């Protein structure tokens, strides 16, 4: 992973600021996701409360797991396999999710968001999504 120590710190410290506004962050994320690609909406349940919790739990595990890749990578690979097999998620959909995530972080963090945060999160999401995509194509 080409993540520097500084970028790791930026991702983890910024995520710690998102956790207290988790409900708002989840609303922002799914609002942006469905705005960017309305065809994704039918893949999700009508009642999104559980889905929002799953998203935030997985993101928390991923951010915390960045310091222990041997434990994180198999979990991310399993998630990628499930998304491919059960939900028919295709590689281009990951780009949309990444855009929604960055938009959510920018809005949620406000003045705490800058180019360095964007770059760090882009690196992290790129590695996570490419790991999920590769596992889903196995």
Image (cartoon, rainbow, N blue to C red):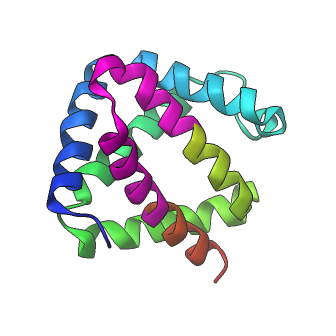
Residue 97: quarter of image: top right
Q: Is residue 112 magenta?
A: yes
Q: Residue furthest front?
A: 115
Residue 25: quarter of image: top left
Q: Is residue 54 magenta?
A: no
Res. 89 in view: no
Stretch in magenta: 100-127
Q: Main secondary structure of the magenta part?
A: helix
Q: Residue at x 27, y 24 (%)?
A: 112
Q: Is residue 137 above or below residue 29?
A: below
Q: Residue at x 58, y 36 (%)?
A: 100
Q: Nearer the viewer, residue 21 or 58?
A: 21
Relative horizontal placement of residue 66, taking residue 131 as reference (left or right): left
Q: Residue furthest bottom?
A: 138
Q: Residue at x 33, y 53 (%)?
A: 62
Q: Where is residue 56? Give x, y as percent.
A: 40, 36
Q: Is residue 39 above or below residue 63?
A: above
Q: Is residue 91 above or below residue 43?
A: below
Relative horizontal placement of residue 102, taking residue 82 as reference (left or right): left
Res. 24 in view: yes
Q: Where is residue 91? Give x, y as percent.
A: 70, 63
Q: What quarter of the picture does the C terminus occupy?
A: bottom right
Q: What quarter of the picture does the N terminus occupy?
A: bottom left
Q: Nearer the viewer, residue 15 or 74?
A: 15
Q: Where is residue 14? Give x, y as percent.
A: 25, 34
Q: Where is residue 118? Give x, y as percent.
A: 39, 42
The number of discs equals 0
Q: Residue at x 36, y 71 (%)?
A: 73
Relative horizontal placement of residue 8, taking residue 120 as reference (left or right): left
């Amino acid at each position: 992973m080409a993540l520097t120590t500084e970028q790791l710190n930026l991702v983890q410290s910024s995520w710690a600021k998102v956790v207290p506004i988790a409900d708002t962050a989840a609303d922002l994320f799914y609002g942006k996701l469905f705005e960017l690609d309305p065809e994704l909406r039918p893949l999700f349940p009508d009642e999104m409360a559980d889905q929002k919790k799953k998203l935030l739990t997985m993101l928390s595990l991923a951010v915390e797991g960045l310091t222990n890749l041997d434990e994180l990578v198999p979990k991310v690979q399993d998630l990628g396999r499930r998304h491919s097999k059960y939900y028919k998620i295709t590689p281009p959909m990951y780009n949309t999710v990444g855009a929604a995530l960055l938009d959510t972080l920018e809005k949620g963090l406000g003045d705490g968001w800058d180019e360095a945060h964007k770059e760090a999160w882009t690196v992290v999401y790129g590695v996570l999504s490419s790991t999920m995509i590769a596992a889903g194509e196995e």
